[in-house]
Image (cartoon, grey):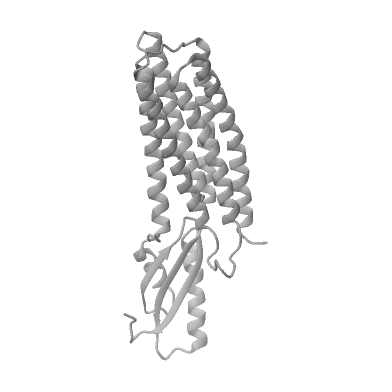
């Protein structure tokens, strides 16, 4: 069995659990939002509904990412998880556009939505559910080094602030200011866009192989290995939890191949011991009197 499979099984378990909660929350807000004609509640409901859609996208992404390396993908399929995170961000952008469109339509039609005690109850209960979900998902995301879980927890966290703005809007409507309803919806759209932008920037940094570990920190660890004279050309890439490291290590030019090979294995072990989430370490052994350019 591929050693990454237990991790992906845990991620899938978390996402299925979160999916059902997101769907329950979204249907409650959408249904009562349409019943009372409160656009901000409808918008928040669709925001939560697309949380569920993003969970499905994430599940598909990690299903592919869980596959072991093969001939066409010798480094594995982990970046499919990153691509799934970007898909979540794209979905968020689409939702934000639709909310803004609906809000501008509402500005001109003079609708007066109805606000009841149940409206407040629905929003408060869904806020509590969202808080529980984002806390649980964020914790699991850090434990499992999962970009999808961390991206989705950031999205769900934004739901809490969105729901709070909806409650403020409901209070304003009760006080006789229905214009606040579409205004709050536009605010929700900007919150959604911000969450999407954060996900995209993080995902792009992984896709373009941005350095994941400070080379100086790796150099300090490697140069403390007995027999290592110096090291350079230290490079790291990959998503959290699956970082690839390659570096050049200088040894005595008169050292035997066997001993230099042993040093290479010790360097690999020390790096994996010193840094979390290292998938593989490639060590290039070279004599100390020459340097690769």
Depth check: give the residue in front, 24 or 124. Answer: 24
Q: Residue at x 40, y 89 (%)?
A: 253
Q: Quadrant of residue 70?
A: bottom right
Which residue lies most toward the bottom here?
254
Relative to 31, say whether 221 is above or below: below
Q: Give left or right: position of 69 versus 182.
A: right
The residue positioned 48% from the left and 35% from the top of the image is 156
Q: For the N terminus, give its image quadrant.
A: bottom right
| Residue 171, quarter of the rendered image | top left
Q: Quadrant of residue 284?
A: bottom left
Q: Position of residue 161 (x, y in %)?
A: 41, 28
Question: How many numbered markers are drawn?
Answer: 0
74 relative position to 226: left or right? right
Q: Nearer the viewer, residue 72 or 214?
A: 72
Residue 214: percent from the left, percent from the top? 36, 61
Say if residue 187 shows up in the picture: yes
Please provide percent x and percent y for residue 227: 43, 80
Q: Nearer the viewer, residue 207 or 286?
A: 207
Image coordinates for residue 99, horizontal then vertical, percent: 41, 29
Q: Is residue 184 visible?
A: no
At 40% from the left and 13% from the top, the residue drawn is: 111
Which quarter of the rendered picture does the C terminus lie within?
Answer: bottom left
């Amino acid at each position: 069995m591929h050693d990454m499979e237990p991790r992906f099984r845990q991620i899938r378990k978390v996402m299925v659990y979160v999916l059902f909660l997101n769907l329950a929350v979204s249907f409650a807000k959408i249904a009562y939002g349409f019943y009372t004609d409160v656009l901000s509640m409808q918008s928040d409901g669709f925001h939560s509904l697309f949380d569920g859609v993003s969970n499905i996208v994430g599940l598909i992404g990690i299903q592919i990412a869980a596959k072991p390396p093969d001939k066409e993908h010798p480094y594995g399929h982990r970046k499919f998880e990153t691509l799934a995170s970007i898909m979540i961000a794209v979905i968020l952008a689409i939702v934000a556009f639709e909310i803004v469109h609906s809000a501008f339509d509402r500005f001109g039609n003079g609708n007066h939505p109805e606000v009841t005690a149940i409206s407040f109850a629905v929003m408060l209960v869904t806020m509590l559910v969202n808080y529980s979900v984002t806390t649980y998902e964020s914790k699991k995301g850090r434990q499992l080094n999962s970009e999808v879980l961390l991206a989705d927890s950031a999205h769900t966290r934004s739901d809490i602030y969105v729901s709070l703005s909806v409650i403020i809007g409901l209070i304003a409507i009760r006080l006789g200011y229905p214009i606040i309803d579409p205004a709050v919806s536009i605010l929700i759209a900007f919150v959604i866009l911000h969450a999407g932008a954060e996900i995209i920037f993080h995902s792009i940094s992984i896709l373009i192989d941005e350095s994941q570990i400070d080379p100086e920190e790796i150099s300090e660890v490697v140069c403390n290995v007995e027999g290592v004279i110096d090291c350079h050309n230290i490079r790291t890439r990959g998503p959290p939890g699956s970082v690839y490291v390659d570096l050049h290590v200088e040894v005595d030019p008169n050292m035997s191949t066997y001993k230099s090979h042993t040093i290479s294995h010790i360097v690999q072990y020390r790096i994996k011991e010193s840094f979390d989430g290292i998938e593989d370490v490639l060590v290039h052994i070279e004599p100390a009197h020459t340097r690769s350019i």
